[in-house]
Image (tube, rainbow, N blue to C red):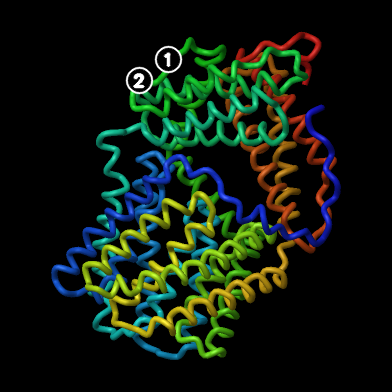
Amino acid sequence: MSDTAIRPRKPSVHRLPVTDVLRLKSPAEIWYKPALSVVVASAVPNLLLYSSGRLDLIMYTMAGSLCALYGHNLPYARRAHTVLRVVLGMAAGLAVALATASVTDSTAVLIAVGALLAAVQKTFCDATRIGPPGNVIFAFVTSAALFAPQEPRQVPGHMALMLAAGAFSWLVTTGPALWHREGPERLATARALDAAAVYAADPDARSRHAAAAAVQAAWQSLLAAGRPTPVRRELERLVVHAERALAATSGDGQVPRADPAELHRWATATRARGPVPSPAPAPGTVEEVFGIDAERAGRRMRRGRREARRRLLRALGPGSPVLPVAFRTLVGCALAGYVSSALGVGHPYWAVVTAASVYQPNLALSWSRALQRTVGNLLGVLVFAAVIPLARVGPLVLVLCVLLFNFAAEALITRNYWLGSVAVTPMALLILEFGGLQPAAELIADRALDTLVGVAVGFLAAIAVTNRRASGRVERALASAGEARDHAERAVADPAAGALALETARRRLTAALVELRDASDVASGEWWQRALPEEELLTAEQAGHRTLAATAQRQGLITLPPANGAV
């Protein structure tokens, strides 16, 4: 398309930015929800332990309370399953950590187990795309538990505390469904409308991908929400409008664009608590809603569940693009822990967690996270030095300080990761105070040194462990996009193709193009690999969007001029 220029071939080694990495962004739309959820999920067990005089057990309840950070963008039906799996995954990692700590005090063994757990957690979080905060919370909990003094007879009781707090976290995260049942779906639909409005106002390759991804996410949210309700039906019709706006501007520019202001108005009203906007149905709405109902029914069938399991197994099997990053995590965390231990640091698991937090989908993003983690942790150490006299006034003050930093971490981390780390670091250090007072100067020195070791060793390990599969993922995405485009073209050309066949073909092609752009973005930030097929990627995206426009025309979503209707 004319709005996209051919990108130059990427060098083997990329320039590492500094200023842009630390720039603050606007806060996330629902930043307060995970912040409030984790405070509520933590406050109840923490205050119960305070009232019983057993604040030394707070580490185990915190393991369950931190599960309340997950799933806030998901519909409540999917959120209930996701947070349950988070609680069970946290319990499995904690059980391994506590069992290991109860049978050995060998630092070398504990570091090895911590690195292995971090790699496994990274693998499953990436494969299931569980979303933020990802594997870092799991690594934080299990690594700390490995170095907590433990007796075998204590493990069942500590696990019971974690599971009880985890069950309460599940209630906290799913409870809002009682009074705002369609809240997450409304938010996803509003984001799709806003993204479509941005593209309609100024169409280019970046905004097109963002709009396609937002529309795809809205459909996935509505699919995962369960059976349709009157509100969800209205949301589906609004997503069709967003999709129509995207399709109408995917041609050659002769098709009238959607009204961006109108899309933004619908998005604002959809986010609010009032009624969902009910504009006149867009052309093709009946066919598209029919298609989404058929897909929803297919997911409920046994073969749909089997296909979901097969996708997960493929994501974890040989050739998976997540495995090189998992291996980086294993090597980097182990080396960081051993270097920290060799330097005589009393808390080497901090280096393990720091290294685990560095690893992102590619090296460019890993560099950004390494820099953010360094700045945030070092500033956080200074904050800890300032608040420790206040926190030691009394146990209740200490509990309140931890809760305050818990809220601040989630409130600030969406502005930039380093800003959230400024609050996470003193919170993690204050948690140690529940087990007994330790020299503040020693804690500060250890945390600062572990940060530098974890970041340096972790990033060097990321450079050493190459990810050649990033290019392979692009090749597979190109092949999938080509197959999806051919399938859609055959459906468009077939006069007997029904609404379901056309909708299925269009949705498959949309998902393939989103995956193609994501794979390209990940591979473009990876080092030591062959150059990406830039022209082939450009051609595939152009052809795919032309086919999407033709499919939308056949479904009645848009009307293209006759001369531009061919695929």
Is residue 523 positioned above or below 234 on the image?
Answer: below
Residue at disc 2, secondary structure: loop
Residue at the location (46% across, 53% down)? 412
For the C terminus, the image quarter is: top right
On screen, residue 269 versus residue 19, left or right, reads: left
Look at 24% across and 68% down and name the residue there. Answer: 160
Residue 20: % across, % down:
66, 52
For the question of whether residue 355 can be seen, the reply is yes
Q: Is residue 514 above or below residue 470?
A: above
Residue reaching furthest to the left: 52
450 horizontally vs 532: left or right: left
In the image shown, does 221 or 190 lie closer to the viewer?
A: 190
537 relative to 212, above or below: below
Secondary structure of the residue carrying tag 1 is loop
Q: Give percent across and percent down for residue 227.
A: 36, 30
Which disc is residue 278 wearing? 1
Give the crowd class for mark 2: few <14, some 14-19, many >=20 residues within 10 Å: few
Image mark for residue 275 = 2
Residue neighbourhood size for the residue with mark 1, other residues' Cα within 10 Å, grouped as few (<14), some (14–19), many (≥20): few
The residue located at (48%, 81%) in the rendering is 446
Q: Quadrant of residue 329?
A: bottom right
- The three-letter code of the residue at mark 1 reads Ser
Labels 2 & 1 near each other (Cβ < 8 A): yes
Along the viewing direction, whichever of 290 and 123 lies nearer the viewer: 123
Measured from the top left, where is residue 372 in percent x and y?
Answer: 58, 61
From the viewer's perspective, tell me whether residue 378 is left or right of residue 212: left
Q: Residue 564 location, x and y as percent?
A: 79, 14
Looking at the image, which is closer to me, 202 or 357? 202
Three-letter code for the amino acid on which mark 2 is drawn: Pro
Would residue 289 be visible to someone looking at this image? no
Q: Nearer the viewer, residue 496 or 99?
A: 99
